[in-house]
């Protein structure tokens, strides 16, 4: 027996008709007929991006050439765009900057956190964290001579594992594979109570859930430009350093853009004031300009409405899961409880890979995370309610017909 009153497609159509965020959909250049659940992996293309980039390339670069660094303010773009992202994550002005990739930024701020706690040796994280974050921590531990320890626990053990040996608690706010969301404020307070620092990876949070880093007292953070911020493939990332730490920290990648006077060409490194000291080399202006279009678009929307729609979409997806999918061997991986979930719903299935491939063939784009997780990310700026109904119907149809068993869906590819 179904747990929920029967839902019908027209209920979803009605939600679309009354959706205050619906106008944003037209601001994205999504292919006709495609249902996109992968904005948490690669965000969609904002319509304004192409024209903005064409102007940048043809006019600003093509005609103005090197004069553009001053004339078009390229030289301050990392700070300017950083402050815009800062508004999305609840940072104070001057705490956020755009640079490099999430991985490289994590390396930098993790090194800074360890500098601030020289007597302590432990980086506390979770085994199910995004592996790349753990690889970065491993590399830093090795570089620092192996005196530190990367201590890994299960998500529900983190709080109890914060003790006075811990220098920094390094967590991803929303887990990439389960969608589980930590209580950022509580764990930050817990870290501080033990004399430790809190470093947050916001890759699956920025632009997806309301954040209040400054209010929570977070020490450091990093995040991704190409997921919910719609900056394009390999877009630059951002980092955040709480104001009170900025004067005390040094970047391990002490490049000239983080120098106090890069164009004095002095011998000897002197760090710039503020978060600028976290820069290494020349910013990628083309890539940052694309990211700026995505961020500007996100800033037009009300984050509370984004969260409200995301949660409603996830709730409906889970109701449809109960009605149509659970009987086909799918399990729900994501928490049912809204406060513990980011903006994605993940299912597991032993045949997850060929099933997701078959779903792609039906124009529904989610992704697969080894060994068995099917991920569905919700980007409320462009994902409609009726699309959720249609996607689940397609998935149920694939299970019903057994279409996923076709040989062509079994092959491996490089990027999942
Ligand atoms: C996507 C993601 C990254 C990406 O790092 P890159 O340096 O851009 O490859 C890092 N951490 C987490 C948790 C992510 O989800």
Image: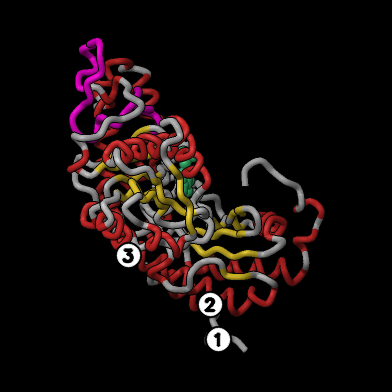
* Residue at x 47% of width, y 54% of height: 126
How dense is the environment of label 3, judged by Cα within 10 Å: few (below 14), some, or many (20 and up)?
some
Some atom of ligand 1 lies within 8 Å of the CB belonging to the residue at label 3: no
Alpha carbons under labels 3 and 2: distance apart: 21 Å
How dense is the environment of label 1, judged by Cα within 10 Å: few (below 14), some, or many (20 and up)?
few
The residue range painted magenta reads: 260-287
Q: Residue 319, labelled with which disc?
A: 2
Does residue 324 appear left or right of residue 105 in this picture? right
Labelled pair 3, 2 in contact (Cβ < 8 Å): no
Report which residue position mark 1 lands on: 3
Question: If the image is split into quadrants, where does the N terminus sit?
Answer: bottom right
76 or 202, nearer to the observer: 202
Reading the chain from its start, which is encountered first: label 1 or label 3? Answer: 1
- Magenta span has 111? no
Is label 1 or label 3 in front? 1
Q: From this viewpoint, is residue 44 visible?
A: no
- Magenta span has 261? yes
User: Magenta stretch: dominant SS?
Assistant: loop
Is label 3 or label 2 in front? 2
Q: From this viewpoint, is residue 327 visible?
A: yes
* Residue at x 70% of width, y 57% of height: 358
333 or 236, nearer to the observer: 333
Q: Position of residue 84 (x, y in %)?
A: 26, 44
Does residue 140 appear left or right of residue 89 in this picture? right
């Amino acid at each position: 027996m179904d747990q929920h009153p029967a839902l019908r497609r027209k209920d979803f159509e009605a939600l679309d008709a009354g959706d205050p965020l619906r106008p944003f959909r037209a601001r994205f250049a999504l292919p006709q007929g495609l249902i996109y659940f992968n904005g948490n992996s690669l965000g969609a293309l904002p319509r304004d991006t192409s024209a903005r980039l064409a102007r940048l390339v043809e006019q600003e670069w093509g005609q103005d050439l090197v004069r553009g660094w001053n004339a078009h303010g390229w030289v301050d773009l990392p700070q300017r765009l950083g402050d815009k992202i800062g508004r999305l994550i609840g940072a104070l002005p001057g705490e956020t900057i755009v640079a490099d990739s999430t991985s490289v930024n994590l390396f930098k701020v993790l090194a800074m956190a360890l500098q601030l706690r020289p007597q302590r040796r432990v980086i506390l994280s979770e085994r199910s964290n995004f592996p790349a974050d753990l690889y970065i921590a491993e590399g830093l531990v090795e570089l620092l001579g192996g005196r530190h320890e990367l201590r890994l626990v299960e998500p529900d053990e983190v709080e109890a594992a914060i003790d006075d040996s811990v220098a920094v608690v390094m967590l991803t706010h929303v887990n990439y594979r389960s969608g589980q969301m930590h209580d950022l404020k509580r764990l930050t307070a817990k870290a501080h109570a033990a004399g430790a620092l809190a470093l947050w990876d916001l890759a699956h949070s920025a632009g997806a859930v309301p954040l209040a880093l400054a209010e929570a007292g977070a020490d450091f953070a990093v995040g991704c430009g190409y997921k919910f911020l719609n900056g394009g493939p390999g877009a630059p990332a951002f980092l955040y350093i709480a104001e009170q730490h900025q004067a005390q920290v040094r970047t391990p990648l002490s490049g000239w853009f983080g120098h106090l006077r890069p164009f004095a060409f002095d011998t000897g490194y002197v760090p710039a004031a503020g978060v600028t000291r976290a820069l290494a080399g020349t910013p990628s202006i083309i890539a940052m300009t694309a990211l700026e279009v995505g961020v500007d678009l996100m800033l037009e929307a009300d984050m509370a409405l984004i969260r409200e729609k995301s949660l409603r979409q996830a709730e409906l997806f889970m109701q449809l899961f109960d009605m149509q999918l659970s009987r086909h061997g799918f399990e729900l991986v994501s928490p049912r409880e809204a406060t513990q979930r980011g903006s994605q719903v993940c299912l597991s299935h032993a045949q997850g890979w060929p099933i997701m491939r078959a779903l792609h063939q039906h124009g529904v784009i989610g992704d697969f995370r080894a060994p068995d997780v099917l991920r569905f990310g919700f980007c409320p700026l462009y994902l409609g309610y009726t699309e959720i109904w249609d996607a689940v119907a397609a998935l149920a149809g694939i299970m019903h017909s057994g279409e996923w068993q076709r040989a062509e869906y079994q092959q491996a590819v490089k990027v999942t």
